[in-house]
Amino acid sequence: MWLAYLDETGNTGKDLKNPDQPRHMIATVLVHESRIRALHAGMRRVARRTFGDEADEPAFELHGADIFGGKGAFSDLSPQKRIELYGDVLELLGRHETNVIVRGVDKPRLAARYPNPYHPHDITLMFTMESVERFAEARDADGEDGCHVLLVADENAENEDAALRDLARYQRAGTTWGWRSVEIEHIVDTIHFVSSRTNWGIQLTDCVAYLASRRERVLAARDRSPSAMAVRRLWDDHVKPHVRHYEIWRP
């Protein structure tokens, strides 16, 4: 069994032309069940190295945007210290043999092509499920008989009901939108929504999601500032080696 932790970034609801958030993206970190406890313990150790007992407080969270931007609990850390902390978090991807999937949609292009498009989250989640299904199919083909995946996502009151209905429909009849239907046979049960504050796996995925979104902006702007170069290094050193599928749909 694999757990697939999902977190989104760039959700602006029905505003598809927001210049600050042009892409809706979902990052997925797949972790084998045998590595879950060790990964969570690793995240806690990373947090405690910097914050000590504060890392055990209910409100504490390793949140990608806050770490990188020096907000909240991270406001007293120097930029270099925050980059080091971000790297320590992402280093756990390799240590615990994770697999990363990033799917997304370009919202302005979606709005330009379709007069009444589906919600970007619905589109991106369907693409994500297809990629997770293909990951599991490949594991089966490589000899991991009976590979199954359980989806664990960050709480999102706006999209939870639709996401649950969509997965149930895809499990019955395959994905129904796009150029080729994919039968969802390896994703079991339903989507389990949890609070990121109580789940280290979701916090790790949040850091991947934020970095993926930030990297898209860096590449689009051809930004070579110190901050942009830090984004590139974090991605290339810690995330890129574990990416199994990365695709932004640009209608």
Image: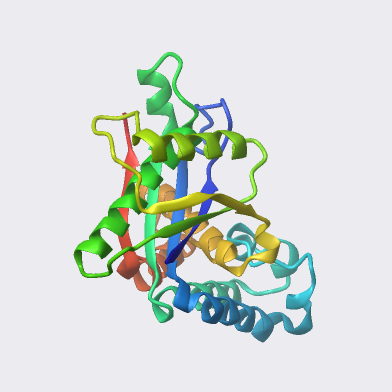
Applied colour scheme? rainbow
The residue at 51%/33% (across/down) is 19
The reply, left or right, for residue 46 in relation to residue 124 is right
113 relative to 105, above or below:
above
Q: Quadrant for the C terminus, please.
A: top left
Q: Residue at x 32, y 34 (%)?
A: 250
Q: Residue furthest top?
A: 115
Tell me the quarter of the picture where residue 31 sits: bottom left
Q: Is residue 9 left or right of residue 32?
A: right
Res 232 quadrant in image: bottom left
| Above or below, comparing residue 23 to residue 43 in the picture | above
* Quadrant, the N terminus: bottom left
- In the image, is residue 192 above or below residue 12? below
Residue 155, percent from left and from top: 65, 49
Residue 235 at what x, y percent from top left? 39, 65
In this orientation, does residue 200 appear? yes
In this view of the protein, which residue sits in the foreground, 181 or 16?
A: 181
Left or right of 38: which side holds 51? Answer: right
Residue 102, x across and y down, in percent: 39, 52
Q: Is residue 92 visible?
A: no
Quarter where residue 45 is shown? bottom right
Q: Residue at x 59, y 72 (%)?
A: 82
Foreground pick, 77 / 163? 163
**Number of numbered tags placed on the structure image:** 0
Image location (x, y in percent) of residue 67:
62, 65
**What residue is drawn where x is 40% and y is 36%?**
172
- 167 relative position to 43: left or right: left
